[in-house]
Image (spheres, rainbow, N blue to C red):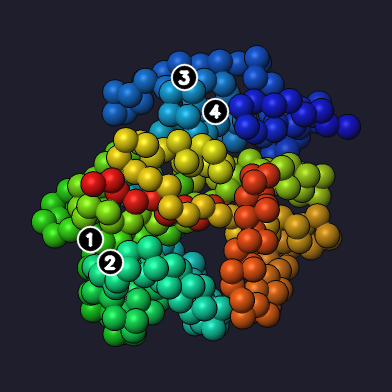
Amino acid sequence: MSKYIKNRNIFFPIDSKSDLYESITYYSKAHKKIRFKDHYNKIHFGNIIAYKNKWKILDCLKCKFIHCIPIPNEKKLKNFYIKKFYNLKRKKDYFKNGIENKKWWNKLYTQRLILFEKLLKKKGKLLDVGSGPGFFLAEAKKRGWNVKGIEPSIDAINFSHSIGVKEAIKGDIDDLKNFKEKFDLIYVNGVMEHLPNPKKFIEMANKILVKNGLLFFWVANDFNFFQYLSLSKTKKPWWIIPPEHINYFQTESLKKLFDKKKFNLEYFNTTFPMELFILMGKNYIKFSKLGKESHKMRQTFELNFDNTNFLKKFYQNFSKQNLGRAIEIIVRKKT
């Protein structure tokens, strides 16, 4: 029987058999503390809460969020993504899934764009950082937004161009510092988990954001309670995947990334708690085919709702308990 201790806003399970979970071991807050300097000469300190192979997972009291150590440098990360993340099979599956689930994605993108338009009171200039195959940009362009995307994968850029999104250009995060134009909205979907220095990125984004402009982030919600409950089924904390994911956010730690002197919180919510499928017997971690089936069920559920305000309120009840597979946050730049 696992015991749970509370470390800040996160519950960590302590299990005598946890060292059998594929080289993962969980520790209590007092078990091991560490202080170190990273490649960027930045000091980190806090409590090691997990190990995975050569990686340590640190609940960093300096950064105020969980991240792996050592933090890989940009060169190693680029090599990793070239060799593994943008491999041929993954690219084909990514583009194929986007096309197959177009109805659901377009509805989601439309909901987001309507919210952005309501907050901005207009359709302005939009930058999608990590624009992937360009599906979001295509939908925004249809609605009359002035769009631009930046994406490191040439294959994703070519795909974007093939669906009419010529505004997607090849580049990475560092290229933002060379941008001269400013944007009403900077859209960042599934990127923050991968960045060696998320706070530096926010500072860069802030410089190319107009006054009263919006920053949108979609970030995985990791170390949530449903994930811990699912360990009895999966036998491994599947959400810990360094170096692909360097950072691991929760609802409160994500909010703390944004300097209250520079930003106002405009919107906050979580998404469907996918871990519920594991708890109900569909172990998509062990049987990957169940993952596609589970996502289809989630999409079918959400497509039933014409009144999306009800669905947002439904998920907000989950967000209050730090539940939901991902976090959505919108902050506004102060004047």
Q: Nearer the viewer, residue 261 or 67?
A: 261
Q: Residues within 10 Å of mark 4 (few under 14, many from 20)?
A: many
Q: Find numbered disc 2 in the image and state the secondary structure of the residue it sits on.
A: strand
Res 136 visible: yes
User: On the image, which quarter does residue 184 sit in?
Assistant: bottom left
The earlier-in-sequence mark between 2 and 4 is 4
Q: Which residue is mark 1?
A: 183
Q: Are the residues at dot 3 and dot 2 in contact (C-beta closer than 8 Å)? A: no
> In x, y percent, where is residue 275?
71, 55
The circle on residue 59 is: 4
Q: CA distance from mark 2 to mark 4?
A: 34 Å
Residue 25's disc is none
Q: Amino acid at mark 2?
A: Leu
- The residue sitting at 49% across, 73% down in the picture is 111
**Which residue is drawn at the image coordinates 69% and 26% (left, top)?**
6
The residue sitting at 64% across, 46% down in the picture is: 320
Q: Which mark is residue 126?
A: 2
